[in-house]
Amino acid sequence: MNNPKVKIVVAVTGASGAIYAKVLFDSLVKLSGQIDAVGVVMSDNAKDVWKVELQNEEYKNYPFQFYEKNDFYAPFASGSAKYSHMIVCPCSMGTLARIAGGISNDLTSRAADVILKERRKLILVTRDTPLSLIHINNMKTVTEAGAVICPASPSFYSGPKDFEALARTVTDRVIDLCGLENESFRWGEK
């Protein structure tokens, strides 16, 4: 593979859908040969939601560098660290709003601001329903700024057999958006 290794920031917010973060983490571990660094920031609510929904604290066992939510000395708090991608998974509507408003009051919103100002790829795996006009306008704002909205809307045509496989239909799209080579279901291919 000729592509250079990438540096990825993953932010996990307190939106429901910890399974998406878990499956994304699992995929990033498998694809580590294509990745130079993975920096993770989890909100306190994200940790609580993980415990409630997945009934464990296994996020602590992943081989990534974890940063505190207000650690502005994290490398991806500056564009000079050259993190090329940021994934917010799942992305709460509050986090979306702060990113859309350019409010850098924690590491997640600061890192997103950096990714956007450097014209790098910000992927927001939004997880809420129904959507208000405020949510839709915030999505429009971040999309116009260069972000990609990748809703946590699983697909069913691959015949997922369990919750993780269903969640993977979303996270595989995220992996594709990062330009990583990943074996996954491809429409029209056997």
Image (cartoon, rainbow, N blue to C red):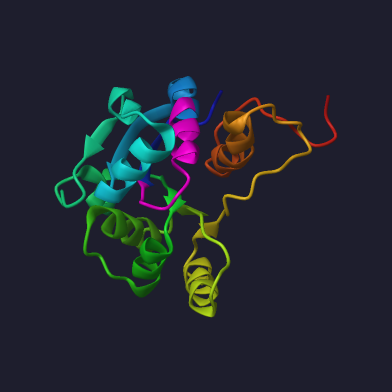
Q: Is residue 185 above or below residue 101?
A: above
Magenta region, main secondary structure: helix
x, y percent for residue 21: 44, 38
Q: Which residues are magenta?
A: 12-26
Q: Vertical placement of 55 versus 70: above or below?
A: above
Q: Compared with residue 127, is residue 162 higher up or lower down, i.e. above or below?
A: above
Task: Point out residue 49 in the picture as x, y percentages from the top left corner.
Answer: 36, 44
Q: Is residue 181 visible?
A: no
Q: Residue at x 83, y 29 (%)?
A: 189
Q: Looking at the rendering, in which quadrant would you find the C terminus? A: top right
Q: Residue at x 55, y 37 (%)?
A: 175
Numbered disc total = 0
In the displayed structure image, the side of residue 154 where residue 105 appears, left or right: left
Q: Position of residue 69 (x, y in %)?
A: 21, 49
Q: Is residue 119 left or right of residue 176?
A: left
Q: Nearer the viewer, residue 59 or 119?
A: 59
Residue 53: in magenta span = no
Q: Position of residue 17 (x, y in %)?
A: 48, 45
Name the residue nearer the viewer: 46 or 143: 46
Image check: 112 left or right of 28? left
**Residue drawn 56% across and 23% down?**
1
Could you tell me which residue is drawn at 36 percent across and 51 percent down? Answer: 14
Residue 24 belongs to magenta span: yes
Considering only vertical position in the picture, is 113 above or below 74? below
Residue 2 in sight: yes
